Image (tube, rainbow, N blue to C red):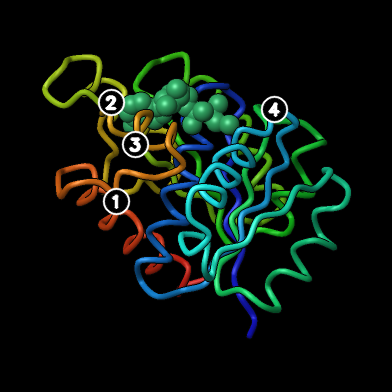
Amino acid sequence: MAGQVITVAQQKGGSGKTTLAVHMALGFRARGQSVALVDLDPQGSLGRWFMMRLEDDPSLCEAMDFATSSAWGISYECRKLVASHDIVIVDTPPKADSDLRPALRVADLVLVPVASSHVDLWATEGVLDLAERENKAALLVLNRARPGTRLGAEVAEAARGLGAELADTVLANRVGYAESMGRGRGVTEGPKGPGRDEVIALTAEVADRLAKV
Ligand SMILES: Nc1ncnc2c1ncn2[C@@H]1O[C@H](COP(=O)(O)OP(=O)(O)O)[C@@H](O)[C@H]1O
Ligand SMILES: [Mg+2]
């Protein structure tokens, strides 16, 4: 097996990197693929989520793995994990500097969450520049979107102007994301609802994009 690596990166903290990493993992699991999560962020929230899940019910972590890594160790870690998993998802700290480069270098696709604000948008160019320098495809994902607001429309419009690919699927601002993750779960595991639909749709888009790299 030779899996593919998705790196989730965005200089701005709180933009939804960890939320996106978790939900892409659940989305690919729901498609029957094995997934490994790698946490590069010393804050360790991805690890807490995984451990909570594992302690709650180990069967929830079937075909799912978790590792931490330092920035410099990521290439070794990913080489190991892609040998035994379909998808490796790397969650990164809020940075867009030379520390981030190894995590971009290992990526088949870079996912960049942009929370619905101009501040988030301003922080995006740094990551896009770095990804381009590493010759990596990047896909922007609008997160915490508030459909029907002027700000939401402005940010979506400005994101299109950045010259990067923008996912058609938008993750809306939903309390379910925070709530489910606080229990070691995700929105796809709760009752049926729009959150689950958007995660399924985004995973399908990301899978399509990965098939093209
Ligand atoms: N789509 C969303 N709807 C509601 N809350 C969200 C959404 N995405 C992220 N959040 C919340 O925003 C905060 C920051 O998200 P997080 O994924 O930890 O960002 P990062 O990893 O980029 O710092 C968390 O409290 C998280 O629950
Ligand atoms: Mg995070």
Which is nearer the N-term, disc 3 or disc 4? 4
Q: Which of marks 3 and 1 is in front?
A: 1
Vertical placement of residue 23 versus 123, above or below: below
Which is nearer the N-term, disc 2 or disc 3? 3
- Give the numbered dot on residue 43: 4
CA gap between label 2 and label 3 equals: 26 Å
Q: Judge: label 4 CB < 8 Å from ligand 2.
A: yes
Residue of label 1:
188
Q: Nearer the viewer, mark 2 or mark 3?
A: 2
Q: Which residue is drawn at 28% across and 32% down?
A: 176
At label 3, which amino acid type do we have? Arg
- Where in the figure is residue 89, as x and y percent of width and height? 59, 55
At label 1, which amino acid type do we have? Thr
Q: Residue at x 60, y 50 (%)?
A: 7
Q: Judge: label 2 CB < 8 Å from ligand 1.
A: yes
Q: Which of 24 and 118 is in front in this view?
A: 24
Crowding near the residue tagged with mark 2, few <14, some 14–19, many ≥20 C-alpha atoms within 10 Å = few
At label 4, which amino acid type do we have? Gln
Which is nearer the N-term, disc 4 or disc 1? 4
Residue of label 3:
160
Residue located farthest toward the front when viewing the structure as drawn: 56
- Where in the figure is residue 120, as x and y percent of width and height? 47, 20
